[in-house]
Amino acid sequence: MPRRDMRYLPPRAKPLTAGPRRLSLAPVRIVHVPLGRRSYDIKIGPGVLGRLGQECARLGLRGRCAIISDSNVAPRFARGARQSLSKSAFESAVISVPAGETAKSLKSAQACYDQLAAHRLERKSFIVALGGGVVGDLAGFVAATYLRGIAFLQVPTTLLAQVDSSVGGKVGVNLKAGKNLVGAFYQPRLVLCDLDTLATLPAREYRAGLAEVIKYGIIYDAGLFELLERDLPKLLDREPKTLASVVARCCEIKAEVVRQDETESGLRAILNFGHTIGHALEASSHFGKYLHGEAIAIGQVAAAKLSAEVLGLPGRAVERITNLFRRAGLPTALRLNRPQQQRLVATMKLDKKVSGGEIKFVLARRIGSAEFGHRVPRGLIERAIT
Ligand SMILES: NC(=O)c1ccc[n+]([C@@H]2O[C@H](COP(=O)([O-])OP(=O)(O)OC[C@H]3O[C@@H](n4cnc5c(N)ncnc54)[C@H](O)[C@@H]3O)[C@@H](O)[C@H]2O)c1
Ligand SMILES: [Zn+2]
């Protein structure tokens, strides 16, 4: 393997062979999330969903479980998940919520609790979150609160969920007033990223996931950013090797940030680069017009412009950032009139990162390094979102 590629294999990655029924001997990459008693592994590779049952047994889980999924994912993957579980003597029930952001609500959580109770899940039972970030956030929140907390595993099936939402233990639901306003920190026992599941992901959803991938390059790893500039066409083609090493590198960065700051008292906030504006956009378009990834692509380009004004991020870096999002097929700008701009800034004030009414931003000093806590004058924000 060329030396340059080696840098993108997580140093702790141990090659394993995939499940016995697979012909492919593609290695499973393992990224460890070291959080003391709450530590867990992220296993990344093609076909890892087939190991679900074995993995649950290895974790010492017992008895009954519920697979929480959605109306797009359950028909595709719930059967395979159940088969794997039953081979290891786990009884499972499938709870399916409607696909889409609106399922991340207290109403859906209530429906899940009722079904968990109907299926007689107990303190020792566990939940498998099988789906994208919506299912992961909802199922994790349900796991954190049902019977004051039962074990759960993440089996993310979107690129966004594999590189971001399934790792780190932030779980929750939305309120009308804004996204993720009710939630908890609750770590999964294992994350299984089956790269094969990404084959059926619609192109628009896949590109939205790339917005979080690019984010890691901007906030943490200039080398990853350069790799993305070089290998974007392969990544857009979902070329397995490139995809595997990029997903693993993103998980490794997320694991490292979460290790240093599990409950977001400092460093972890850099993961919100582009999210203050992104969340406001999602909320102001009623979680409908933009996908999360699209909203934060626009938010990150705006945050790059603010970084240039406030921290002296070079103009050339702003251009490279904008170009990479554009090449990934993501939106980079908005056309807003003045009242719309003002409404968007007002919505930003509802974001939970706001304290004392002041909006603080994550800004980049250069590609590969970000800082949290910068106050930005309102006029600059308005200019950056035009
Ligand atoms: N907890 C965190 O740390 C964190 C981080 C980032 C984002 N999030 C949250 O994640 C959510 C967005 O997640 P998402 O982008 O995965 O959206 P999503 O869960 O809505 O999935 C996107 C769409 O793809 C479908 N889908 C999922 N997997 C599929 C597959 N393999 N094949 C075909 N279709 C598939 C889903 O049914 C859905 O329609 C947002 O609510 C966001 O707030 C949370
Ligand atoms: Zn995000």
Image (cartoon, rainbow, N blue to C red):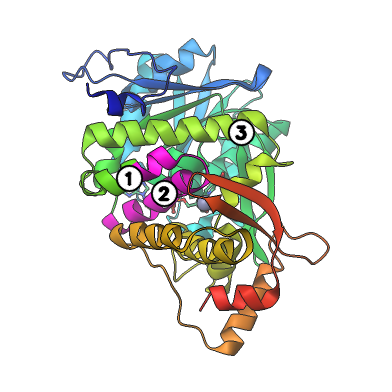
Q: Are marks 3 and 1 in contact (CB under 8 Å)?
A: no
Q: Is 348 on the left or on the right of 216, as rendered? A: right
Task: Examine the rendered structure and indicate whether residue 138 appears above or below residue 66.
Answer: below
Query: Which residue is painted at 67% across and 18% down in the image?
Result: 36
Residue 119 in which image quadrant: top right
Q: Name the spot of residue 262 as percent of width and height, x first.
A: 67, 33
- Marks 2 and 1 sit apart, C-alpha to C-alpha, by 7 Å
Circle 3 Cα neighbour tier, 10 Å, few/some/many (<14 / 14–19 / ≥20)? many
Quadrant location, the N terminus: top left
* Residue 344 is covered by the magenta coloring: no
Give the amino acid at mark 2: Ile
Q: What residue would you read off at disc 2?
A: 214
Q: Is 261 on the left or on the right of 247, as rendered? A: right
Q: What residue would you read off at disc 3?
A: 258
Q: Name the spot of residue 80 as percent of width and height, x first.
A: 31, 30
Q: Is 11 on the left or on the right of 256, as rendered? A: left
Query: Which residue is painted at 38% across and 58% down in the image?
Result: 320
- Tell me the SS state at disc 2: helix
What secondary structure prevails in the magenta region?
A: helix
Give the amino acid at mark 3: Val
Q: Name the spot of residue 266 as percent of width and height, x first.
A: 71, 42
**Residues rendered magenta in the picture:** 203-226
Q: Are marks 2 and 1 in contact (CB under 8 Å)?
A: yes
User: Which residue is the extreme one toward the left?
Assistant: 23
Residue 225 in which image quadrant: top left
Task: Examine the rendered structure and indicate whether residue 241 appears above or below residue 335.
Answer: above
Q: What residue would you read off at disc 1?
A: 228
Mark 1 vs ligand 2: CB under 8 Å? no
**Lower position in the chain sequence, tag 2 or tag 1:** 2
- Marks 3 and 1 sit apart, C-alpha to C-alpha, by 23 Å
